Image: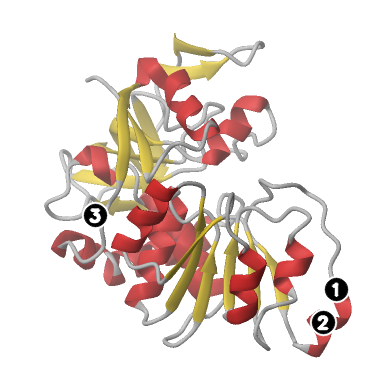
Amino acid sequence: MHAMLIDANKNFVWREVAEPVRGEGDVLIAIAAAGLNRADLLQRRGDYPSPPGWPEWPGLEVSGRVLEAPAGSRWRRGDQVCALLGGGGYAEKVSAPASLVLPAPAGLDLTAAAGLPEVFATAYLNLVVEAGMKAGDVVFIQAGASGVGLAAIQLAKQAGCKVITTVGSPEKAAFVKTIGADLVVNRKTEDLGAVLEANPVDIALDCAAGPALGEHIAKMAPWGRWVLIAALAGNRAELPLDVLYKKRIRLIGSTLRSRTEEMKAAVLRALEKDCWPKIAAGAIKTVVHRVLPMAEVAAAHAILERQENIGKVILTVAG
């Protein structure tokens, strides 16, 4: 088969590689499409390699059709599925543990389904498992027009929460309002600190961090939970420790990719039960910004690098 490798100059190369060997409890999938994530950009730079046991090339979520499955499992050849991976999605095939494979939601094409597992699992893990989101919480979500941001906004609204989010353009602001965001802050032209001062948040899902983290976390409501999943605005911040302990605020560092298979599987089971019927019914929207063939992967990465996307960028695999 072929996979999209990264050469010594950080360029993409579509190259023949060994066929994946299906493990005893794995499902072999013929990949139809792969969803892009910012982790893919880090991996291309050499900063975020695949975990042990996964292919070296990028790709954290895919859709496709089952080629082989364990005897006695729920999966049959030809089933349309999507899967959460540790890596290896930029290819024609992948072998993944059966516990990390989900049915494509009813009525959803495989292109859109490719953009579901990573972002919805990330949003659910951090809002529900890490932060204990409940009805009535005020939830702050950075980068609301990103794939994770759009998933998180919708999960929070489905749970009965008030949502504050940031975006980088008026177009993105208008869009996130259509899917439920209550307060939208243009990070380039508006004062986020003033909004958080007036609306103390119970939960924050933060991919930005940077120097402003200390100012913003101090404005949380008592018992607030600030979940940090990336540091796109910088790796250094000065924190007001006295405010944190006086308000009993928790700062939680979290990544999905490094979790055990069992932890990921538990999140996926919850998603299938709680969210897949809502996606099938249209109550939760899937948002695809652009679809490109795998041959145009560099252009797809550039869209994320320029922060142009509203929702997911998807790569399709011919076959």
Helix, strand or loop under label 2: helix
Amino acid under label 2? Val
Q: How is the image coloured?
A: secondary structure
Would you say residue 93 is visible in this rendering? yes
Q: What residue does disc 2 label?
A: 243
Check the image and report above or below for 308 versus 298: below
* 245 on left or right of 294: right
Residue 1 at what x, y percent from top left? 36, 16
Q: CA distance from mark 2 to mark 3?
A: 54 Å
> Which label was assigned to residue 280?
none
Which quarter of the image is occupied by the C terminus?
top left
Mark with earlier residue (3, 1) = 3
Q: CA distance from mark 3 to mark 1?
A: 55 Å
Along the viewing direction, whichever of 207 and 58 lies nearer the viewer: 207
* 52 on left or right of 279: right
Helix, strand or loop under label 3: loop
**Which numbered disc, 3 or 1, marks the residue closer to the eye?**
1
Q: Quick one: which residue is furthest to the left in this view?
A: 107
Would you say residue 99 is visible in this rendering? no
Q: Residue at x 30, y 48 (%)?
A: 287
Q: What residue does disc 1 label?
A: 240
Pointers 1 and 2 in contact (C-beta within 8 Å):
yes
* 107 on left or right of 237: left
Q: Residue at x 30, y 72 (%)?
A: 274
Q: What residue does disc 3 label?
A: 72
Amino acid under label 1? Pro
